[in-house]
Amino acid sequence: MLDSQILKNNLEEFNENLKKRDISIDVSLLIDLDENRRKAKFEAEQIRAEQNKLGKEIAKADKNEKQELLKKASELSNNFKSLSEKAEEEEEKFLDLWIKIPNIIDASSPVGSTDEDNKEIKKIGEVKEFKNLRDHLEIGETLGLINVEKAAEVSGSRFSYIFGDLVKIEFNLVSYVMNKLSDNGFLPTVPPVLVRENALYGTGFFPDDAEQVYKIQNDELYLVGTSEVSLAALHGDEILEFDSLPLRYAGFSTCFRREAGTYGKDTTGIFRVHQFDKVEMFSFCDPEKSKEEHEYLLTVEEEILNDLEIPYRVVDVCSGDLGASAAKKYDIEAWMPSQNNYREVTSCSNTTDYQARRLNIRTKKDKDTSLIHTLNGTALAVGRILIALIENNQQEDGSVEFSDELSKLTGVKKLS
RNA sequence: GGAGAGGUGGCUGAGUGGUCUAAAGCGCUCGCCUGCUAAGCGAGUGGGGGAUGAAAAUCCCCUCGAGGGUUCAAAUCCCUCCCUCUCCGCCA
């Protein structure tokens, strides 16, 4: 959520941002609603003040005076009730619209409408040529490492079983990444994957992306699509020690996504599934240092991909492709030989104070309390990394063989 | 799942309808005192929103787990929810 002061202080920036994001809303309506709610609240408060004053007089008054004063107080009370009701209505009217306004985009983010307009920043690693090119599913099925057909019978489409050495690789990679992050000041965390509605509003997934989230009907709980949600909410309603910033966490969790509206898209194998495991970095940061922190998270992501010997490119995500809460976002896309293309394996966002305002996370600096900035980045999206590892290290005979260096991380030299 | 007890400021803890503007203690900050340290003395010490103002500031509203209700008036009474603890049952 944005600071509504922007309507008074920096309307130009506000309008420009809407333009960049290609959103058309009635700004003058917003301004009116904002003014109305302030006015309504102020009027209610005035009456409340009178009422409070009178209440104190009543407490001191003797019996004769009391009856008279009570009558007056009763009037004020009714008056206040109707005014504060009105104030609440006005507040709600404004907030309903305001909560949907996305974050202010960083000046350095490219302007554009779709992922086609994302800006490639760099391309690292050599793309190999393959004879008898196979995709990860074909390799995985043949070697008995992946089964999506059986998973479809058990759970429906977009689920998978992974077996044997692939599981071994998953746990080895998670362990490698957790160690690396722990060495770099991230606190390893296993957060809850079921959360209340509030955590999803706080992180900006609600109300906009609600259709992507699984709901547990009986208990009013939701399955997180990323541990970002539970990590961000960890410090909700807190004032963090300024000297403790940045507070960095590395969360391991299973992630659940409904993938509504993706029918027919990425239907092969385990690329786009309803359930996958992920290690996520999350940082609570001094607002003045969030840009550096963002670059830092990206660096960590790149190091991991380099260690894993996966060719990749880094993309600066354009205005139209940013989520509501991000001011700036870098995606890393790994080379996927079977698709002859780079595909997203990490995403790293600076959400500035957008989540912090909703979650009420602040710090105290020189006596002033101010909102902190939050950032998140994927350290290891297990499923997609497994795909990249399988496909980029496949052999002509349909086996998969890792370099000596890489096999130290996977714990497996050859899949056959 | 059953039975019970609770949630008050950074912490401990008093407070069962109006002077609560939340006692007291601890902690913290500043000052005094002391050769240093401790003790002592004094002052201050949460958060959010708003009005006026160039600013400094002054004033107002909200906040005792959350949300409703009763009342002229709620930390205090009533309802719903959340959380914590104890006992029983079940359980990885």
Image (spheres, coloured by chain):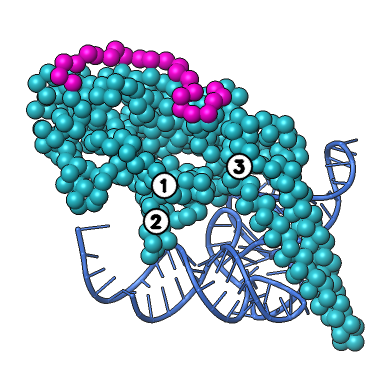
Identified at 38% across, 65% down, the residue is A218
Identified at 31% across, 35% down, the residue is A266
Q: Nearer the viewer, residue B54 or A3?
A: A3
Alpha-carbon neighbours of circle 2 within 10 Å: few (<14), some, or many (≥20)?
Answer: some
**Is residue A121 within the magenta segment?**
yes
Q: Do the residues labelled 3 and 1 touch (CB within 8 Å)?
A: no
> Can residue A286 be seen from the camera position used here?
no
Among the two numbered marks 3 and 1 on one chain, the one whose residue lies closer to the N terminus:
3
Image quadrant in which the N terminus of chain A is located: top right
Identified at 60% across, 37% down, the residue is A23
Image quarter for residue B68?
A: bottom right
Residue, disc 3? A101
> Where's residue A362, x and y in %?
59, 43
Q: Which chain is cyan?
A: A
Alpha-carbon neighbours of circle 1 within 10 Å: few (<14), some, or many (≥20)?
Answer: some
Q: Which of A354 and B41 is in front in this view?
A: A354
**Magenta span of residues:** A109-133
Residue, disc 1? A212
- Residue type marked 1: Gln
Q: Secondary structure of the magenta portion, mostly?
A: loop
